[in-house]
Image (cartoon, grey):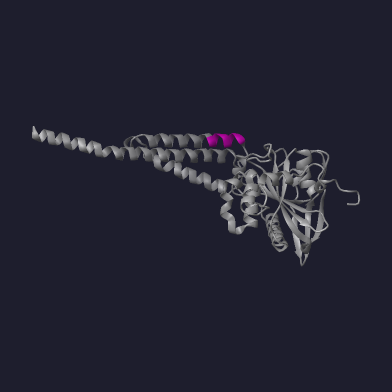
Amino acid sequence: MLAARMVERCESNHADSSRPIRWRSRLGRVGLALIVLLFTLWGAAAISLSNLPVAPIRLLLAIAFTALGLWTIRMLMVPPRGRHRFAGLTFPLTFVIVWTWWWLIPPSHDRDWVEPQSRLPTIEIAEDTLTINAYRDFRYDSNEAFDAIFRTREVALSAIESADLYLSRWQSRGDGSGRTAHTFLGFNVRDEQPIIISIEARLERGESFGLIRSCFKQHELIYVVGSPRDVVGVRVRHRGERVTRFRLRAAPEEVRSLLLEYAREVNELAEQPRWYHLLRNNCTTNIVRIAFPDRRRARWDYRLLLNGRADRFAHAHGLIDDSVALEQLRSEAVVGPHDRLIKPARPQE
């Protein structure tokens, strides 16, 4: 009897001690399953939006990859004895193949681009003179009807006096805020029109911008260099966007140095195409990368990821006037349809 009781106690203690191990094992398998699910969703999207020319083949491969991911998840949920012996290797190897293939898809300058983004600018620097080629100065009757004008513009670097941060919101609240916006910079030239540089997703004819698609190598990058009548005016007058302009707190020497950095980026992009990416390589993250190299970690600040609040970031860090409340600054910064900045050109211009 005594021996039997001792055996029962040992078995009970063993069962109690094995319960935490079982729970940890189950939690580990659930965690792995979630990781596989995320990789499955990413891989299916990457395949369906890849550079394979035949859409049905892309769809079939995406379905097959999804099926493999779901089968792998099922194998993770069964006891080890019931698993297929290759269950732990098939999905990781397949994912590495898909990721490598996707990573090697090259960007291109050779596509049928929409007319406003059909030409890449370059900026030549000779002592104090900047020569901007393919400077965009379109005249718009509507967003779709315009006279396409690309020209060459020369400016003296010493005439660059200040810079402005622009936020263009296509959806905004009554106070002018909103979660998303397009951000770009303007460089103010003494006694001349500003130079506007807008970092954008480059679109092909018939193509529209897609938030998800922009994360899967569907849009190349372009630096649009043009006049405020064009780059700002089309947004205010013909797209119904709310544009605000904030003067950056920077000395003229700092602004000129920033413009030269932009010129370097513009010329490098003309030589080597790059992909636009919604989170890593967009209008706002590139401004931070170029203008504030010591603050590159700030690219992951929520106010820059939700870049409709980029003015909050700039205000909080003293990059724009922080002596007044941001709400007041916003109301004073609106570029209206009759603003002299975007007035149509006079005939002699």
- Identify the image quadrant of residue 294: bottom right
Count the marks: how many?
A: 0
Q: Residue furthest left?
A: 1
Residue extending furthest top? 1
- Say left or right for 332 vs 34: right
Q: Nearer the viewer, residue 338 or 282?
A: 338
Residue farthest toward the front in the current orientation of the protein = 324
- Between 91 and 325, the residue placed more toward the observer is 325
Residue at 74% over, 57% down: 162
- Magenta: main secondary structure equals helix
Q: Nearer the viewer, residue 188 or 333?
A: 333
Image quadrant where one finds the N terminus: top left
Q: Considering depth in this image, is 118 or 215 the residue closer to the camera?
A: 215
x then y, percent, for residue 315: 64, 50
Provide the residue span drawn in magenta: 55-62
Left or right: where does residue 322 sit relative to residue 29?
A: right
